[in-house]
Amino acid sequence: MADSLIEWTDATWNPTTGCDRTSPGCDFCYAQKMAGRLKAMGQAKYQVDGDPRTSGPGFGLTLHPDVLDLPRGWARPRMIFVNSMSDLFHPKVPLDFVRQVFEIMADTPRHTYQILTKRSKRLVDLAGSLPWPGNVWMGVSIETQAYAFRADHLRAVPAAVRMLSLEPLLAPVELELNGIDWVIAGGESGPGCRPVDEAWITSIRDACVASRTPFFFKQWGGRTSKTRGRLLQGRTWSQYPSPGRGRRPAAS
């Protein structure tokens, strides 16, 4: 476990590391860059290289069964981002391993677990084979309108909280928020980052306000994630789903 600098979580837990680019939001992946640095530093978890066409040094998909039990030892309740350095629903992660991760989460109800994936079709395909405890918040990433279908897949999943991460937001996105419990939005950060338009963000915020969906604006982005801060029209938006909120109806 590592304490996290990500604004919407407390800590990270990586039962797998590594991934492969699957859509434009992956083009400047922070995790891939970090994996390369960690490999150079000799970190044991980052010694498997990925396909250079879709991944990179130290970023090959790797299972870490030795860290599965870590959350059992964390006495203080935490909000935990699962796989900040990977995607739990990557096709190379076996169903049995995904199930083990979910069983650990079910066995540690004092924690709240947040999971994001871009592989929403596999999420739907595996959902019926997984336990869905009430402390699991499941989300998908959407960077342009072309990937809004991931929200439809998410609505078919029996998670207690369903969340959308619109980061990095690369174009305007219009979303149906029925069955969605939380929306995070933000611009891209890092060298070469693509700028976000304020109108894209305010449109999403306004849709959340109209539907009473909690909205979290993470960052404007820039060369670093802190370059332009988090203020949106003079206000910081840091809303979360209410504790014990329960599942909202999904779209029919």
Image: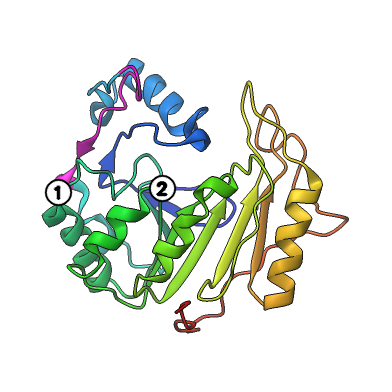
Residue closest to the far left: 96
Q: Residue at x 22, y 61 (%)?
A: 126
Instruction: Say what secondary structure mark 1 lies in.
Output: loop
Specify the amino acid type for callout 1.
Answer: Pro
For the question of whether residue 73 can be seen, the reply is no
Q: Residue at x 15, y 47 (%)?
A: 65
| Residue 167 point in image, percent of width and height | 58, 46
For the question of whether residue 46 can be seen, the reply is yes
Check disc 2 and report the residue beneath it: 118
Task: Decide if residue 47 is on the left or right side of residue 180.
Answer: left
Q: Nearer the viewer, residue 152 or 51?
A: 152
Mark pair 2, 1: CA separation: 17 Å
Q: Nearer the viewer, mark 2 or mark 1?
A: 2
Instruction: Say what secondary structure mark 2 lies in.
Output: loop
Q: Residue at x 26, y 43 (%)?
A: 16
- Name the chief secondary structure element in magenta: loop
Check disc 1 and report the residue beneath it: 94
Extent of the magenta region: 52-66
| Residue 38 point in image, percent of width and height | 36, 24
Q: Residue at x 59, y 45 (%)?
A: 144
Specify the amino acid type for callout 2.
Answer: Lys
